[in-house]
Image (cartoon, rainbow, N blue to C red):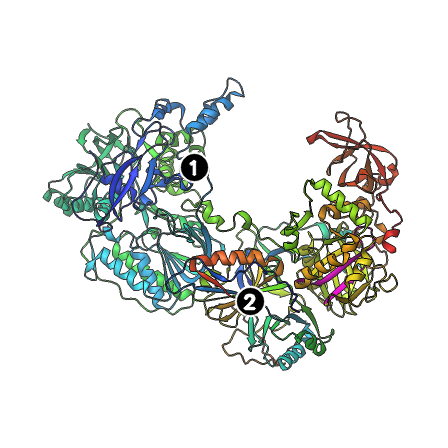
Amino acid sequence: MRIYCPICGERDSGEFTYGGDATVHRPAMDETDAEAWCQYVYNRENRRGPMLEYWHHTQGCRAWLVLERDTVTHKILSQPRLVGPWADEPKGNPPIDSGSDTGSAERERVSEPVGAE
Amino acid sequence: MSEMVHALAGHAQPGIFGNLGEAGPAVTLAEVRPAAVLQVGAWPQTRAAVESTLTSFLGLSVPQAFGMSSGDETTTVMTLGPGRYMIVSADAGLREGLKEQLDAEKAAITDLGHARTVLRISGPAATKVLRKGLTLDLDPGAFPERAVAQTAVHHIGTLVHRREAEVFDLFVFRGFALSFWEWLTDASLEYGYRVADPL
Amino acid sequence: MGGYRLSSGGSQIDRSRRVRFSFDGRDLGGFAGDTLASALLANEQTLFGRSFKYHRPRGVLSAGAEEPSALVTMRSGARVEPNTKATMVELYDGLEASSQNRWPSLRFDVLSVNSLFSNFLSAGFYYKTFMGPTRKAWMVYEHFIRRAAGLGAGGFQADPDRYEGLHAHCDVLVVGSGPTGLMAARAAAVSGARVILAEEMAQFGGMLPNESETLDGVSAGDWAKATVAELSALDNVTLMPRTSVYGYFDDNVLAAVERVADHMPVPPENTPRQRHWTIRAKQVVIASGAIERPIVFDGNDTPGVMLSDAVRSYALRFGVAAGRKIVVCTNNDRAYHTALQLADRGMTIRAVVDARSTPPQALVEALAARGIEHFPGHVVAKAEGGKALEGVHIAPYDPHTKRLKGASRWITTDALAVSGGWSPAIHLASHASGRPNFRDDIQAFVPGEAEQAWRAAGACNGDFGLAACLAAGAEAGAAAAGDAGFGATALPQPSVEGGEAEDFAVLPLWEVPAIKGRGKKFVDLQHDVTAEDVRLAQREGFQSVEHLKRYTTLGMAADQGKTSNINGLAIMAETRGASIPEVGTTRFRPPYNPVSLGAIAGREIGAHFRPVRLTPMHDWHVAQGADMLAAGAWLRPRVYRQPGESVTDAYIRETRAVRDSVGIVDVSTLGKIDVQGPDAAEFLNRVYSNGFAKLPVGKARYGLMLREDGIVYDDGTTWRLSETQYLMTTTTANAAGVLTHLEHLLSIVWPELRVQVSSVTEQWAGMAVSGPNARRTLEAAVDDMDLSNEALPFMGVRPGHLGGIPVLIARLSFSGELAYEVYTEANYGLPVWEKVLEAGKSFGIIAYGTEALGALRIEKGHVAGPELDGRTTAADLGLGGMASRKKHYIGCMMLDREGLTDPSRLKLVGLVSLSGESIRPGSQLVEGATMATSGPSLGHVSSTTYSPALEKQVALGLVEGGLERTGHRLYATYPLKGHHVPVEVVEPVFFDKDGSRMHV
């Protein structure tokens, strides 16, 4: 399986570690309902078909990604996206030959991920 | 400090080994010993300021694209991801200088100077050797000069920096250096390799 | 009778280069370019081996990778390789090969007697025959059956050759280099795409050398050579001959094996015998051709019965006639052209037997013109001959009733060229597609709907004509390049002159009725599966094609049913009264061809099976003769044995030396994580169960990390280096896991926290200096540090210099002694280590290893990995006080569950052996005084050691009721080794109970 990392480009799945069901959210720190915590810690839907998953690029940039993948065909159905503090940041521009890029505060939001074919 | 004992000390003996064609060894291997290897991490709110500080402090423009580098004879700056940079330099004073420029609110600076062993592989068969361990597409179109990639070679985390068409710097965890060296030299036997003195 | 070398011809051989080889010890000769099969045929060898079950004599059926019968053992000694297809072996000088599965010789095989018992050895016999008289009887039968079973024998010596794994990337991968593949490669290359052309055989061109057409005015074979030369000159094309693409995996990743040196006596130095390629292609063109089908009839396994295209190949490519009196039997036009080609090269064709009653008139006339007898509407009903074909019985055939309709007649022949049609080689496509589709016109399956980025073209897609293949290849190559992002340029087609009829229609003919009785009609030659076996499977209820395969083993041999699958399922369809598509094919799975384990392992063998991780002081440990122990990927010193010492002697000595004076141990393997940022204190407070928000700068604290379910995950110390920077240590084993855990929290759970974490395990060398003289030792070593109890109190952290080298010293104790952890940057690790040793000389300092490290901490009751086993809570370990009630942290919400607070939970205790016997870790704790009366398990032993301080065997364990059992006698039982040791339950600390030794 190949997984597209928004930072590193397409890589072999062996560089990644599965990170769990991405539809599950940790209850708020002040949540006192024991059921809610048990649900979070123990219960997962064993989905057949498309599933939203976290993947961790452990042998690469170590970013966390979220993607939709079919658990039967292994096909990745969505463009993997970063999760975390940088999730909404504009991506870097595709590599250019000259080395004279300067950072500009007004960067154009790039809709195509780096390295997309 | 001359007392430093590097990971490959006593192991990377200079010499020429393997299958030598008429043109001699097709691969040269050498350990690179930068005086500074620093990881700099910004936060989203501070990224622009950090990049601008690095640019002016290093006199190098920090690449916008992930997986690219810029550099001069002394220093290379790599953009590894959003707000994450690696600086490799022959200038030992860089660490202190950078700490003065970037306080804890702006960025996290992590010294990795002793945590990595850097190996330079060069020569006409450099790419052929790397194909034995790297799953990356090493075609110049896909991985051009100055490109940088974080990946793994046989489960050993490796940062690959392509300096020129057939010159690559490989950064591996110090603890895996000998294991990695043994793989690298074994893979180079087919093409003949020369071990040069550390740079 | 048998084959012979023609006096001229053979596009693949070089008659000026003679090659000597041996087969079954006989010295024989051939030419460069021969395969072992062609050379043996040329030497009149008819017998190549003995079949799997019945030990029937077998010859060679084909000229390629689909060969089921001619399996030989190559080479000898450490390089011996059994079950190699003689058709795929490139002849070289000095080649040694031998036949298999026969004793004492190929001609006189004692086990051919199995044939007499064939009724008892039919499909599934081991489920039916050999049952009883007792249940144990099978073990007796099995011994003999096992001796008789199998084909070749493997070797027992280590393989001396190299194998390597490599990675490749391309825009278009073309699999197969017949006319289709060559055109596809040209079309894709012309567009600028990066192209890899992989060809299974040593020569490119596929069937082109066999074809009589001219392309662009030159012979088909010469056109192939010129095209290959043109491709090899292009920078964007990589040619890979001798490379079999054996598997198609997810996301357009394919695997292939390149036979680099199998055609040489030994591989050249430093060169692999085989290379395993993992190819990531944007687009794939599958041009894998088609495999000819045999026909199933009585005696069809007789040596001398061959596929007709193979007979043509042997003549045209190798200059070898398969026999002196050849008969051709067919259900299609193409075999006629084979007959004509052979006749025109001087071979004797006795007859053409065609199941169709009205073949094309032009072909009939062509046969007549050459004096070749013609039998339309006839089939071969039986082949006879034992070790070599002597002749065939042919009979008139009614395709509507599928019966013989008349008397048979005998034709003397020594080579029967059989053509039952062609099966597209859809295997690779099927790894990446839905179910294959059946085409009635060619009576064959073609690839199903693509589930990956590939397209099939040419014969593997059901287009058998040469012109059609050339066009399909060009179109597929251009389209693939286009889909990969390269603009396609139209490629001019070569002009095709002459050649054969383009009609590849076949009369469906899978099986011929026997003349008398049921006959012996083989479907799968390699596994000795007959047509009767297929019918037996159906009678016994195994009628789905997947059951047919497993019950009869049809298609499960090394040839994977390449010449038998379709015939088998067609016979099943007939037996069931179903259509062929209704029966369907089994699922094709990789590998397409056998792949050696060496190719898969590559260089990850021996010491390089896994990477090895070394500390900065590793070479010193080894030079001192330490026993090195694997701890995950790390190597750690276990003990430093003196001459004459056992491991136990050594660790006891080392432990005593630490308690008596001072010792130094390498702790560089501990995980170390740099935690930085304005919110670092808050983050640590949420990650550890005990308080971290108020840890002062310059202090370290022991921290307990729980899992979300409340179970203890890891422990370590975290040092506050500044307002916003911490150094966290973890256990060696959990270093990677803890880093991932922290990254997960910062990316997914609390992305708003401004904290960054990085592994700095490798940045720091760490050494613990422990013992009553630890302070004095370090005072003698450091340059500028005040190490008094006031200046560096317990749990304090101070930077300084030691021998001119910057160090960070933390006053922490794992051993319970006065102790310091000295950290320095890794490249200074060894110099600092040596300076401390020098400074400690006058105190008799020794280096100690992990055994002594363990003994010391067990004596003090410090929990470690064996206690943090994923089942214990902080309270179970007596650390309940570390689970704060005043803040939110990972695991806090699950701690109060009934299951985790149940009083019957296992709790940490100390154990002292009452008999002086050592206690085995993992022993169960029971009340019964003997193993037989032990009673239920009340808990288990987690860590054990001899305690030099107590001079007793002691242990830590977890037991129901914990310290309520203090003073009780229990037994540590280990039934697997017969141990049952009486122990007393005590407090889990054996030495220095008030901990005062750490605080001096």
Q: Where is residue C486 in the image (x, y as percent from the top left)?
A: 40, 68
| Residue range (magenta) | C805-826
The image's mark for residue B198 is: 2
Would residue C541 appear left or right of B9 to someone viewing this image?
A: left
| Residues packed near mark 2 inside 10 Å, few (<14), some (14 to 19) or many (20 plus) | some
Would residue C493 appear left or right of C529 to someone viewing this image?
A: left
Protein chain holding label 2:
B
Q: In this view, does C461 lie above or below C110?
A: below
Q: How far apart are marks 2 and 1 (CA)?
A: 47 Å
Q: Where is residue C765 in the image (x, y as percent from the top left)?
A: 69, 60
The residue nearer to you, when weighing B53 against C505, is B53
Closer to viewer: mark 2 or mark 1:
2
The residue nearer to you, when weighing C794 against C345, is C794
Would residue A25 be visible to someone looking at this image? no
Q: Report the residue that reaches farthest toward the front.
A: C842
Helix, strand or loop for disc 1: loop
Q: Is residue C815 magenta?
A: yes
Residue drawn at x 32%, y 63% as measured from the top left: C231
Q: Which amino acid does label 1 sit on?
A: Gly
